[in-house]
Image: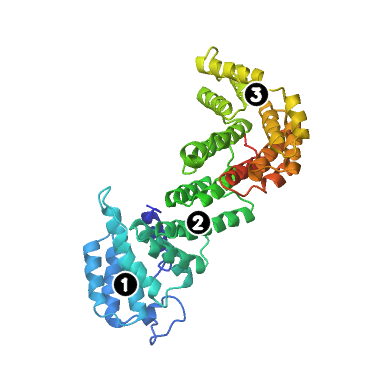
Amino acid sequence: MMQGSKIAIAAALTIGLAGLTVAAPASAKKEEKAASGFNPNNMSPAVRTPAAAAQTALAATPPDLATAEAKVTEADAVAKNDSDRYILAKFKLQIADQKMRAAPAGTASDAGLAAPLDALLANPITTAEEKKQYANFRGGIAYNQKQYAQAAQFFTQAKDLGLQNPDLLLNIARSKAEAGDVAGGMNDLDAAVKVETAAGKKAPEAWYLYAISRLYKAGLNDQVDTWTQSWLAAYGSKENWRKAIYTFGFSGPSAAKLTDRNRIDLYRLMRATNSLAGAKEYIDYAEASIKTGLPTEAKATVKEGLDTKIIPAGNPTATDFAKQANEMIAADKPLAVQEKAALAAPKGDLANFAGDAYLGERNYAKAVEMYKLAGTKGVADNDRLNLHLGIAQALGGDKEGAKAVLAKVTGSPNSAIAKLWITWIVTPPSA
């Protein structure tokens, strides 16, 4: 359920009922037309007696619901004006609330509260202060009954009437999303996050997680990426970073579109965020590096895993990958020779390869130099070049330069990877 209706309605009943009496005052005059709010002087004489009896029955300990209900039904038959209908709706609300409270555990339903709340919302003498509360409660009931479009309307009505409630914007967003307008609901939720930020507060983490899960379910993957980045900016623990990277690159809807080269860029980010969690990930990282012709990166990854004891000493798979990496390095030209060839080449491909090798070796200054050279000569895939240049700059400490370069990456899936790197630059993982 969206909210605790028993508590909410109990609070609602205090609005406009405190000290209220339906008996005719001793100084009762002719009926007066109240501009706003209930005035007992305006009740019909035929309604007053059964209404007073209903009030007495409700005030008994315990409340005499059978008598109260019978008297309200009697008064209902002769009700003539808004004051009559107002007080009777209040009594119906109390009766429905008491029935809900008395229901056996697991069987209580707030559906019976809907009709009297609707009557109060439609009544012109119900004050705006009451209406904004009633609209909010009515939205919760509609949501609990899975009437999501109605829930969105009621919550929006409460907001328009000026209700200040920390969950109201979230409830509007959730109702719209469950009614089928996922994009619209998340736009409202984004507005709610901005309200919290403007007030100097941080929106609850549950808001981000709800948006991510709901957009994921709707297949709106670009928005999933955007909300994931916002979530990490606000709640960027290393555990959350690992969860986000792993979902994006290894298990989520984008995973099938990624190559080993793409995953290496994500492994690099996991390393930068201290979110490589176990021996398997280090070994998979090394394997992907070998497959894509980056033996220096494979060698460095295995070494780091062994040095930190995340990979157990003597692990046969890690030992085999280290051996393959060393053999590939020995068979290849030294990096200094590759760099010299890149300088002489008419195009930037060799410089790009040299940049990848230096990046894998974690010589970020040289990697940046080679990637920039490749850019001046021209390469087939500028997005990948800019992604790797930005990564090298970020890891080398040039955060501003990295952000500018990574912002140039526009093609999928590299653009999403670049945005994750920008998020790390702006807000690195919290402790």
Q: Is residue 146 above or below residue 217?
A: below
Residue 128 % position (x, y): 48, 71
Disc 1 or 3, which lies upstream in sequence?
1
Amino acid type, residue under disc 1 in the picture: Leu
Q: Is residue 344 above or below residue 32?
A: above
Asked if residue 23 shows in the view, the reply is no
Disc 2 or 1, which lies upstream in sequence?
1
Left or right of 79 in this view: 418: right
Q: Which numbered dot is residue 88?
A: 1
Left or right of 33 in this view: 341: right
Q: Which numbered dot is residue 249?
A: none
Residue that carries the numbered disc 3 in the rendered image: 296
Q: How many marks?
A: 3
Of circles 1 and 3, which is in front? 3
Q: Which numbered dot is residue 186?
A: 2
The residue positioned 30% from the left and 72% from the top of the image is 52
Residue 390 % position (x, y): 69, 40
